[in-house]
Image: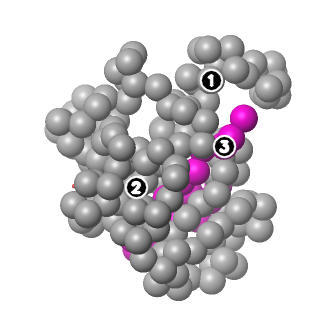
């Protein structure tokens, strides 16, 4: 089973990236991609990542648009937009090896990145605030990947142990 990968287009906050590293480890996701221009040292993630910063595969890219143009991953962009596919839509299914793409904390995904995505997906919210913290969005998306795998019987959870 190919793992789900996480791509951060242009993150700003090391605290968020540390939490995302922990999410990647917790949900046994694949590679975490972020730009070389995000210069925080791996050791700075320690507080939020709780030691998982040395256990997760991290790859840095030069240019997001260039990477997204060249990659063979199916690209799923996450946006707080009402015209995107709802993650809860029963017809929307994650696939093995997807690349889940998340935007900048202030400005979200760029238009270039959105245009290069195969699908734009949104996490529904009930209150006024549609826009979630990026690390929370990653955690929800990886949980939904897990939930869908359980639903189709691809994995079974027994007392918090995953059987593939
Ligand atoms: C703090 S938000 C970006 C805020 C920005 N002002 C905007 O409108 O996109 C950071 C990232 O988290 C993800 N995100 C936040 N809320 C989301 C939602 N409801 N559904 C899907 N992704 C979401 C998106 O990838 C977004 O680019």
Label 1 vs 3, first from the N-terminus: 3
Label 1 vs 2, first from the N-terminus: 2
Q: Secondary structure at mark 3?
A: loop
Magenta span contains residue 15: yes
- Which residue sits at x=29%, y=47%? 79
Q: Residues within 10 Å of mark 3 (few under 14, many from 20)?
A: some
**Beta carbon at label 2 within 8 Å of ligand 1:** yes
Q: Distance from label 1 to label 2 (Cα)?
A: 22 Å
- Which residue sits at x=20%, y=42%? 81
Residue assigned mark 3: 3
Magenta span contains residue 57: no
Residue assigned mark 1: 149
Residue 46, percent from left and from top: 68, 70
Residue 143, percent from left and from top: 56, 34
Judge by depth and name the residue closer to the eye, 54 or 48. 54
Q: Residues within 10 Å of mark 2 (few under 14, many from 20)?
A: many
Specify the label residue 81 is tagged with.
none
Disc tally is: 3
Residue 126, percent from left and from top: 25, 29
Whether 148 is drawn above or below 110: the answer is: above
Whether residue 116 sits left or right of residue 5 in the image: it is left
- Which residue sits at x=38%, y=30%? 87
Q: Secondary structure at mark 1?
A: helix
Residue assigned mark 2: 102
Judge by depth and name the residue closer to the eye, 46 or 142. 142
The span picked out in magenta is 1-23
Judge by depth and name the residue closer to the eye, 71 or 86. 71
Q: Are marks 3 and 2 in contact (CB under 8 Å)?
A: no
**Beta carbon at label 3 within 8 Å of ligand 1:** no
Asked whether residue 16 is in view, the answer is: no
């Amino acid at each position: 089973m190919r793992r789900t990968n996480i791509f951060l287009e242009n993150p700003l906050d090391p605290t968020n990236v540390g939490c995302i590293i922990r999410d990647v480890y917790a949900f046994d996701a694949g590679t975490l991609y972020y730009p070389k221009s995000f210069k925080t040292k791996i050791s700075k993630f320690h507080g939020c990542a709780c030691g998982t910063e040395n256990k997760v595969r991290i790859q840095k890219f030069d240019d997001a648009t260039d990477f997204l143009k060249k990659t063979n991953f199916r690209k799923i962009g996450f946006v707080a937009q009402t015209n995107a596919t709802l993650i809860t839509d029963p017809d929307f299914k994650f696939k093995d090896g997807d690349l889940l793409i998340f935007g900048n904390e202030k400005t979200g995904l760029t238009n270039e990145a959105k245009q290069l995505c195969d699908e734009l997906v949104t996490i529904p919210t009930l209150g006024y605030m549609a826009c979630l913290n990026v690390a929370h969005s990653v955690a929800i998306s990886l949980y939904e990947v897990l939930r869908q795998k359980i639903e189709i019987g691809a994995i079974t959870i027994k007392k918090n142990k995953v059987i593939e």
